[in-house]
Image: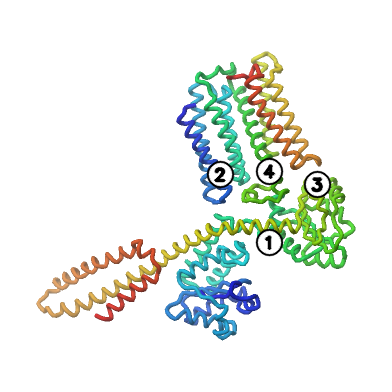
Amino acid sequence: MVGVSHHTAPVEVRERVAFSAGGAGAAARELRESGAVSEALIVSTCNRSEVYAVTDVGGEERLQEWYATAHGFAPKDVEDWLYTRRDREAVKHLFRVASGLDSLLLGEAEILGQVREAYKAALEHQATAAILNRLFQTALEAGKKVRTHTDLGTRPMSVAFAGVKLAERVFGKLAGRRALLLGAGSVAEQVAEHMRNRGMGTLLLANRTAEHGAELARRFGAQAVPWGELEAALREPEIVVSSVSGPERVLSRAMLGRVMEARGNRELFVVDLGVPRNVEPEAGELYNVYLYNLDDLTGIVEQNRKARQDEIPRAEAIVAEHVAKFQMWMASVEIVELVLALREKVRHEQEQILHDHLCQFDDLTPEARRQAARQLQALVDRIMQEPAEEGAEARLLRGDAPEIRQVREIIALAGEKS
Amino acid sequence: MDSTFGILTLALYVASLALYAWLLYSNHRLLGGAATGTLGAGLAVHFFALYQRALEVQAVPYQDLYGSMSLFGWLLAITYLGLEVLHRQRSVGPFVLPFVIVFLLAGMWLEPAIPPKGPDAHGPLFALHVTLNILAYAAFAISFVLSAIYLLQNRLLRDRKMGVVFWRFPALEVLERMSRSGVMVGVAAMSVGLAFGVVWSKRLHDSFVTGDAKEIASVVVLSSYLLYLGLARTTRWRGARAAALCIANFLLVVFSYTVVNLYLSKNHRFF
């Protein structure tokens, strides 16, 4: 695996080495067809651009070169940002990525879907084969298990998401609910986006300036509400997100008291993102009003960050378990190939012996020759049984694949010498 | 109750409680299945325990207070299991099961060596009267637990204390809805159960109403929950106040089930 990520390169560089959503699969196929690697898969997100490949000796350099030239760089231009992982370390890296352990926002949920999409794209372009298919299936399994068996991804890690998750603590699913946005800001936009992603029903938007409000409403896909009708508009939504610039309070305790009376005391969840605050803090004391400001949400995110950190050992243990599982599979593949290669070698030697030595005995009948061949075959089978069984033993399977390649090299060397 | 079945039931309920509690902290999916499975096994063994006791005393298992406590525990557990399957919520399990265990233990350990004499009442009407009322108590108990969790969740939200358990609880609205549903089941069961009781009273005492303390307590309990249902959706009471009312009502249930049964009632005193 070679790649660039937020750990090694700034966003200006990551932008230049990113593959487009539709281009990653084609690029992987192109890489495979070039002959530099036998399998290829590209994972490209806003925070990383990585190429996973199955290759032989010398393949690492070819991959690095391809990566650089694919983005119009000379290889030495990217060497400061490019990192490389081999064998077990590459497997572990991928599984950590899929689990969110390597993400900028620890435990973020999106990466698993992005890895899944990258795998799907590579499959569609036939850039992968048995090894990468198995690798990515196991990676997705590991990522899913980390999500379901740990708290790494459950607790919100951004202010915007914290606000939405807290609203869900009050109302349950947000599908069909109504929200009112007051003003606009980057965090308010994120909140609105999160709410939309979670099936929020109606989004209303009110802004002091009517034209600006209409434009914002169009952008958010919301219904514009005249600022002058704010108090009436507050009777309907379950969630209010306020992000108005200016020193005056937008929502007072008295106003919200009237609103709660008018709406039959139905729960109201208010997120105050304004600095200075838009909502009078005393309004949070009203019955069935839940009020959170920026400090509250930041504090919750901080609590969650610590909690996620505590989950890292469990997540790493799940990753390690899946790395071992994949390594065992790899070893079994290599073992099978090794035993087949050994069988073929022995069969060839057996034929050679029969040809070279039995033909010297002219007085041997055809039946005697066949008997000799059968006995030789039986001897070979008996000799080969042990390597096959030994190969299936835990010792070799627990070892890394390189151990098996070393055995293959030794056998090859012995063959060449004889 | 036979000690073998009783101890096995207790062990299974305790194991299930441990698994539910562990699930609340660790969120392992397999734990959830194991907890539910163990609870199911406990319910099955408990059923056999009740059946065996019925054979021993040659009467329905709720013939006396002790048997009814054990049956209450069983109905509570099975009602909770139904709720869990319906709402796919396991987070309430650790809070319901302690009650199940307490009532099972009460049934096992408080039972005198010589079974008390049961009422002179038999037949389906009596059976329905008792079973429906115990079912009502079980439903009210679940609503009590849900209301308590509601108040706890509400307090955690207001105090901004969001530990691991906070994120696993059902949402406030869900808790409120579940609690209200539990009360509706309880009110329906109790209304029909009391109606059967009134009919039975006529047969037994030649009077629909005898003025027994248990009759009065039951009417008070039923009225208090009807009041809860009426108030829970009103402007002033919806939310935390309704949950507090539900908890207060359950204290009346406990009073009726214990003090009234044991000391105040003439017709319902079996000890």
Residue contact at pointers 4 and 3, CB within 8 angstroms: no
Number of numbered labels in the structure image? 4
The amino acid type of the residue labelled 1 equals Ser
Q: How far apart are the alpha carbons under marks 1 and 2?
A: 30 Å
Which residue is tagged 1?
A158
Q: Position of residue B100 (x, y in %)?
A: 57, 34
Left or right of B155 on screen, residue B90: left
Image disc number at residue B20: 2
Q: Which chain does the numbered disc 2 sit on?
A: B
Image disc number at residue A234: none
Left or right of A248 on screen, residue B171: left
Q: How far apart are the alpha carbons under marks 1 and 4?
A: 25 Å
Q: Nearer the viewer, mark 2 or mark 3?
A: 3
Q: How far apart are the alpha carbons under marks 3 and 1?
A: 27 Å
Which residue is tagged 4?
B152
**Vertical comparison of A139 with B87: above or below:** below
Residue contact at pointers 4 and 2, CB within 8 angstroms: no
The amino acid type of the residue labelled 3 equals Leu
Which residue is tagged 3?
A286
